Image (cartoon, rainbow, N blue to C red):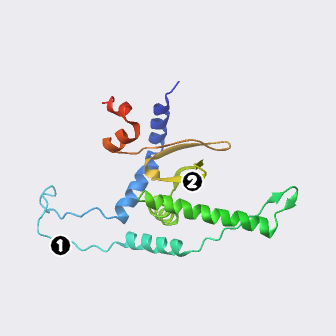
């Protein structure tokens, strides 16, 4: 039987072509610095050269992001309750809750130095092609928190099953200070 880490690593290997495509897109959009080299020996760079390159991919991505970000999102709820269709008052209450819910997610993201959810989503759709994250709403001291942590799908592996998502794993990096602050003595004992 495979361990959890072995399952994740096998899925990452399976997704490697997708990750490679994401890396190529990133390199096109954010242009790796170009270094002019000698014709007779391409391994030797030429100094004191000014390169001017028009970044058409970045221009396209920025246009797409601007168009998607500028679109208005309208929350519309339709459904049934007690074998009848929801009336406008009932669906309106749910729509107001959802709008406030997304505003609170934005507030919490900004506190953690992420961009607002809509901006993050349109940027990642344009450059990565996929979006994902970890979402868990909870109550603490009578206060409702809709926690959401965006994931860069370049570093995420997941498996869908018959009824949706079976599992997901996000590879992250944190400083030793952050890990010690959260886990205390447990982290200090690890190498």
Disc 2 is placed on an element classified as strand
Residue 173, given in percent of the width and then of the height, sits at 37, 45
User: Where is residue 55, by image quadrant?
Assistant: bottom left
Left or right of 47? Residue 61 is right
Q: Is residue 106 left or right of residue 114?
A: right
Q: How busy is the neighbourhood of tag 1: few (under 14 within 10 Å), some, or many (20 plus)?
A: few
Real-space CA distance between mark 1 and mark 2, rounded to the nearest whole angstrom: 51 Å
In this view, the residue in front, 176 or 20, is: 176
Q: Is residue 161 above or below residue 189?
A: below
The residue under the point 56% across, 65% down is 103
Quarter of the view holding residue 160: top right
- Image quarter hosting the C terminus: top left
Q: Which mark is residue 145?
A: 2
Task: Identify the residue at horizontal 35%, vertical 39% (top origin).
Answer: 180
- Pick the residue in front: 85 or 67: 85
Q: Which residue is mark 1?
A: 50
Q: Position of residue 152 (x, y in %)?
A: 45, 53
In the displayed structure image, the side of residue 63 where residue 54 appears, left or right: left
Q: Nearer the viewer, residue 125 or 22?
A: 125
Q: Residues within 10 Å of mark 2 (few under 14, many from 20)?
A: some
Label 1 secondary element: loop
| Image position, residue 190 (x, y; %) | 33, 30
Q: Is residue 159 above or below residue 31?
A: above
Residue at the spot 52% in from the left edge and 51% down from the top edge: 133
Q: Pick whichever of labels 1 and 2 is earlier in the sequence.
A: 1
* Circle on res. 110: none
Residue plotted at (38% across, 57% down): 24
Query: Looking at the image, which residue sits at the far right?
Result: 83
Residue lying at the far front of the rendered structure: 141
Q: Does residue 132 sit above or below 32 in this rendering?
A: above
Q: Position of residue 75 (x, y in %)?
A: 66, 68
Closer to the eye: label 1 or 2:
2
């Amino acid at each position: 039987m495979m361990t959890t880490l072995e399952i994740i690593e096998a899925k990452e290997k399976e997704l490697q072509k997708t990750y490679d495509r994401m890396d190529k897109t990133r390199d096109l959009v954010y242009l790796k610095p170009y270094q002019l080299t000698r014709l007779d020996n391409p391994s030797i760079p030429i100094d004191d050269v000014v390169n001017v390159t028009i970044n058409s991919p970045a221009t396209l991505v920025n246009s797409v992001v601007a168009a998607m970000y500028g679109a208005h999102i309208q929350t519309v709820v339709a459904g049934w309750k007690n074998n009848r269709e929801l009336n406008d008052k009932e669906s309106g209450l749910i729509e107001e809750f959802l709008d406030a819910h997304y505003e609170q997610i934005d507030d919490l993201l900004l506190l953690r130095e992420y961009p607002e959810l809509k901006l993050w989503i349109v940027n990642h759709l344009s450059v990565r092609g996929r979006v994902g994250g970890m979402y868990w709403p909870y109550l603490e001291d009578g206060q409702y928190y809709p926690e959401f942590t965006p994931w860069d799908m370049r570093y995420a592996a997941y498996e869908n099953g018959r009824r949706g998502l079976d599992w997901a794993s996000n590879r992250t990096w944190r400083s030793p200070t952050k890990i010690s602050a959260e886990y205390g003595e447990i982290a200090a004992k690890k190498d």
